[in-house]
Image (cartoon, rainbow, N blue to C red):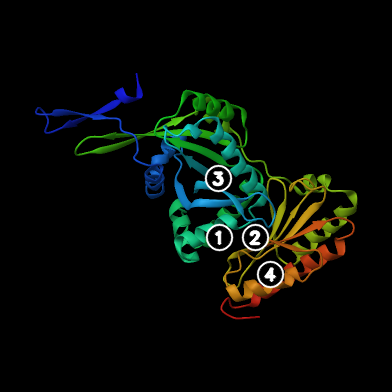
């Protein structure tokens, strides 16, 4: 069947006196129209088809989300839409009309560029910052996340929300993302590439979504259909679980001369009442403020995570709610020799035998902030 012959039929009228109206397929007037529809109506991304057992729910983050191609570089690309789902999976969405010649092989390379460079160069907390800007303030975005997650216990909502954002960071850092190619009609060549990638990739879910538009004089119908998902692939992904690293696995990946630093960091942090959260490759140290809200202050990663030979430690300020105090803490981290700022919230330090003393100073700041947060009213200045 030719694309122009496609149609759906609308049954109108009362039972026994129905009229059948044909709605022929109609191309979108512009790519912008398709993008706007997705932004306003995320249900068009067919979360119930992606996973019928546990339908995907969407949280819109940003349209035209900028992506750099280097540390401290300006944005080189922008992905059409950035979404999150209830499982903390960052989802990159690129839309094209079928009439656009770029919808074939070029769009695949383009999307892989987006995912690879966002993973490498978006700092921890960047997606949360974009969401806060999109929704206007932290309270509004927290409400949107609460609606997305639908937590059972209201008392646990702050913890649930902070854990959600930590998982978003962890998924991005470790390449657990979703790539969605959206068009009114998917060319056969692109279908085959999508199906192949989704079958071969273990961390990255690659799918196409056709959103055909059918138009009559009185009605417009939008019909989404997922491309590239099979029951076998879905079951394989559903059966897999994200494997978090352990203390011993982490230490085994570190050079022997750095293990004493990390074991000391773990021991002292636990003595101070901080929680050690293990991600898929690294760890974070979490404190809590005077209201009991979790606050991540420090990250550690073994060699190789950032494409570097050295391990990496980071001071982090993104969970400090008071803006003035957050800036003070950032300055205290940055005052340490060898640190560099990555994005708004992350302060990096490459960890090797020459920078252990500086890493201890970075860690000491995190410990000091841990003590301050527990005795401090969040409206006060230190």
Looking at the image, which is closer to me, 378 or 31? 31
In which quadrant of the rendered image does the C terminus lie? bottom right
Dot 2 lies on which element?
loop
Give me the C-alpha separation between circle 3 and circle 1: 16 Å
Give me the C-alpha separation between circle 4 and circle 2: 11 Å
Dot 3 lies on which element?
loop
Return the residue at label 4: 330
In percent of the image, x 56 and y 34: which residue is there? 106
Dot 4 lies on which element?
helix
- First in sequence, mark 4 or 3: give its number: 3
Front position among marks 2 and 1 = 2
Give me the C-alpha separation between circle 4 and circle 3: 28 Å
- First in sequence, mark 2 or 1: give its number: 1
Do the residues bearing badges 4 and 2 touch, measured as CB atoms within 8 Å? no
In percent of the image, x 58 and y 73: which residue is there? 323
Return the residue at label 1: 129
Return the residue at label 2: 343
In percent of the image, x 81 and y 45: which residue is there? 253
Q: x%, y% of residue 180? A: 50, 38
Do the residues bearing badges 2 and 1 touch, measured as CB atoms within 8 Å? yes
Return the residue at label 3: 89
- First in sequence, mark 3 or 2: give its number: 3
In which quadrant of the rendered image does the N terminus lie? top left
Give me the C-alpha separation between circle 1 and circle 4: 16 Å
- From where the camera sits, is residue 52 visible? no
Front position among marks 4 and 3 = 4
Dot 1 lies on which element?
helix
């Amino acid at each position: 069947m030719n694309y122009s012959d496609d149609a759906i039929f609308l049954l109108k009228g009362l039972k026994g006196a129905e009229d059948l109206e044909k709605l022929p397929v109609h191309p979108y007037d512009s790519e912008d129209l398709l993008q706007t529809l997705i932004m306003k109506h995320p249900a068009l991304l067919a979360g119930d088809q992606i996973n019928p057992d546990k339908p995907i729910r969407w949280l819109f983050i940003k349209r035209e989300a900028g992506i750099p191609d280097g540390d401290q570089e300006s944005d080189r690309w922008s992905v059409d839409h950035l979404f999150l789902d209830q499982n903390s999976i960052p989802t990159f969405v690129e839309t094209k009309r079928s009439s656009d010649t770029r919808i074939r092989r070029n769009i695949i390379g383009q999307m892989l560029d987006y995912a690879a460079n966002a993973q490498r160069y978006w700092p921890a907390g960047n997606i949360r910052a974009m969401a806060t800007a999109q929704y206007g303030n932290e309270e509004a975005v927290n409400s949107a996340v609460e609606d997305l997650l639908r937590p059972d216990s209201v008392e646990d909502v702050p913890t649930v929300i902070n854990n959600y954002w930590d998982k978003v960071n962890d998924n991005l850092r470790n390449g657990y993302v979703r790539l969605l190619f959206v068009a009114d009609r998917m060319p056969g060549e692109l279908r085959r590439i999508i199906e192949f990638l989704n079958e071969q990739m273990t961390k990255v879910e690659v799918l196409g979504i056709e959103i055909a538009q059918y138009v009559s004089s009185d009605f417009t119908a939008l019909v989404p259909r997922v491309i590239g998902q099979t029951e076998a692939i879905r079951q394989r992904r559903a059966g897999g679980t994200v494997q978090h690293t352990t203390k011993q696995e982490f230490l085994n990946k570190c050079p022997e001369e750095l293990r004493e630093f990390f074991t000391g960091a773990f021991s002292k942090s636990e003595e101070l009442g901080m929680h050690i959260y293990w991600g898929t490759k690294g760890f974070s140290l979490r404190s809590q403020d005077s209201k009991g809200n979790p606050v991540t202050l420090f990250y550690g990663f073994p060699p190789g995570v950032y494409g570097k030979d050295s391990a990496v430690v980071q001071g982090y300020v993104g969970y400090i709610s008071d803006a003035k105090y957050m800036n003070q803490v950032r300055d205290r981290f940055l005052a340490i020799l060898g640190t560099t700022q990555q994005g708004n919230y992350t302060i990096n330090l490459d960890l090797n035998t020459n920078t252990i003393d500086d890493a201890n100073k970075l860690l000491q700041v995190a410990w000091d902030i841990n003590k301050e947060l527990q005795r401090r009213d969040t409206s006060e200045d230190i």
